[in-house]
Image (cartoon, helix red, strand yellow):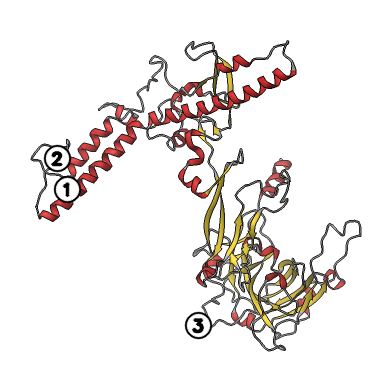
Amino acid sequence: QLLKTASTTMVAKQPPPGATLYVDHANHLTPLTLCYHATASRHLTSGRSDVIPPSTTVEIDSAYCPRSLTFCDAASASSGVFQKDGAGCKDCPVCFSPVSLSIDENTTDEIMGRLVCHYLCGNCQWSSKECGVTSVADKLLEWSTSDDMDAAKEKEAEKQRGIIIAEVSKELELCLQQRIDERNKDGDALFKSITKMWGQREKEEGRRKRMMVGTISTKSGYGSGGQTWSREMLDKSLLEKRKELDSPYTDIKEGSNPATEQIKSDDDADAPAELPNAQQMAAQMTLTTTTPRSRSDLFPLPVAYRTRVSRRCRAELAAGRTGILIKPKLNPLEGDTSLRAGHGQWWKKDSSAVHVVPRVQFCRHGADPTSQKYAALLNVKNPTLNMIRLRFSGPPDPENGSDDAAEPSPLVHLRELENILVDPFTETSVQGHLCSSEVTSSLTPTEFFELDPADDPFLDIGKGQVDDPAEVRNWDAKSALDALGEGSASQMRLVAAQGDTAWVELVLCNSTSGEVSSGDTNNYLAVPIALQIEVGNNSWEASLIKRRDLPKEEQDLVTLNLVTLLR
């Protein structure tokens, strides 16, 4: 019982004590790991696909098989050329496990030959012999090995056997495609007849309008010579065509109950057939137009290819720029160490924000529910190989402010606070409420501080771990709150800076209006702040942002909006 309770406690997701999210150009709250920074752009772009409106456009560049890693371009993926004649890896239609090619000796059917190639599932032992998908592999007997063979002949025999196995596998794939085409023959004929009938109706309707005739006589075999067209005639003709299909929906006789009748198989009319389940039927309907009635109607399932997409920023496209955020390579193995060159180069272009934008993280915090005061310690780290000069400040004033005090800041919409994604890896989402605008309006900017280029942790192995500054180790939220006097305003200050990392203290006073219960552990206080980074003067060169034409003594600042969640 104790082990069961402990395991349940470990599986349950615990809400984080706090988090820091970034606001993109469409005002979406996004973790930094899902953000992009377009080249020389002054704003961020969210890569989330569950936001409305989306911040990016998605284009399919290529597709690849997740099992064999064979790939093709976007045109071949959309046209289906990459799986022509049933080529590609297959899955078992019964248990959906991978199947393999098997060449076995034939002892039942003399017409098929001595060796038969078929698909075999190693999990449930399903074989494509059940659905008639086989090919003859008797040519392998001509190149069998013997004890009196020398090394050269044995090598040649092995080469020829490989060629024969490749040909036999192609014949097996072609047999599968032929069997699928035979199964879809009636359905394709019905579809063609319907399209042909509607084409004739469209021509007759156009002729009737030109001749201004009130009614029209049908010229096809769906009605008599002088009978006019009607919806009833169309429904009747469709029903007649549907009855011609070999389907369980049309084989049921009138007055019978299909749930109680025993469906017979085509091979053995005396023994009851093993009926496929709903999942197997749904998988087969992606290949055929008729519903499978027995296990013998199940064909091997092709493995679905996965797409590799490129993303573009909508704001950059609207401004007339390319806005490419991420673009993959055609070969999914590009960048792998199995290749001779290009190790680690997985993308043609990767503008992920984690490589450029300073990473602001939540360290620890404390709260006084009675006085509605919060104190938090934030950590900011430089991910680039260049120096960055920056500061923290309150949120920027909206350009079109609202006179209604109940309206939130346009930087954070109420719909964004209903479901806030704080951890994309564990898919943890929380709810939040916005703090009052009077609290953030009194936040004064901190002093400018510099972050050194990022330290490579692999170069510091064996040199000893560097501890945090004493101001950070001794920081306590209670002491920060006690230091505030009555009537004090919210404030931000730099606690310490060391190398590529700095720590900033955030203290809020009278942060909420009391509408949300303090006992709700899943409802966070959303505090909008801003990160102002200087561009130029050797600062933030990795962003490739050009300094504006400003006086030399004036700083060019790029403002990135953040939201800190406190509980």
Sequence order check: which comes first, mark 3 or mark 1?
A: 1
- Tell us which disc is closer to us: 2 or 3: 2
Separation of disc 2 and disc 3 at Cα? 69 Å
As measured in the structure, the alpha-carbon distance from the residue carrying label 1 to the one carrying label 2 is 9 Å
Instruction: Report if the CB atoms under discs 1 and 2 are less than 8 Å apart.
Output: yes
Label 2 Cα crowd, 10 Å radius (few <14 / some 14-19 / many 20+): some
Find residue 245 and report its image quarter: top left
Which one is in front, 537 or 249? Answer: 537
The quadrant the C terminus occupies is bottom right
Query: In the rendered image, is residue 272 in sight?
Result: yes
From the image, state whether disc 3 or disc 1 is nearer to you.
Answer: 1
Q: Is residue 526 left or right of residue 134?
A: right
* Front residue of 530 and 4: 530
Quarter residue 36 falls in: bottom right
Tell me the residue that label 3 is attached to. 402
Going from the N terminus, do you reach mark 2 or mark 3 first? 2
Q: Residues within 10 Å of mark 1 (few under 14, many from 20)?
A: some
Q: Which residue lies at the image location 69% right of the left edge and 81% below the top edge?
A: 490
Is 435 located above or below residue 81 in the figure? Answer: below
Q: Which residue is mark 1?
A: 204
Mark with earlier residue (1, 2): 1
Q: Give residue 44's position: percent from left, percent from top.
A: 61, 69
Give the amino acid type for the residue marked by disc 3 in the picture: Ser
Quadrant location of the N terminus in the rendered image = top right
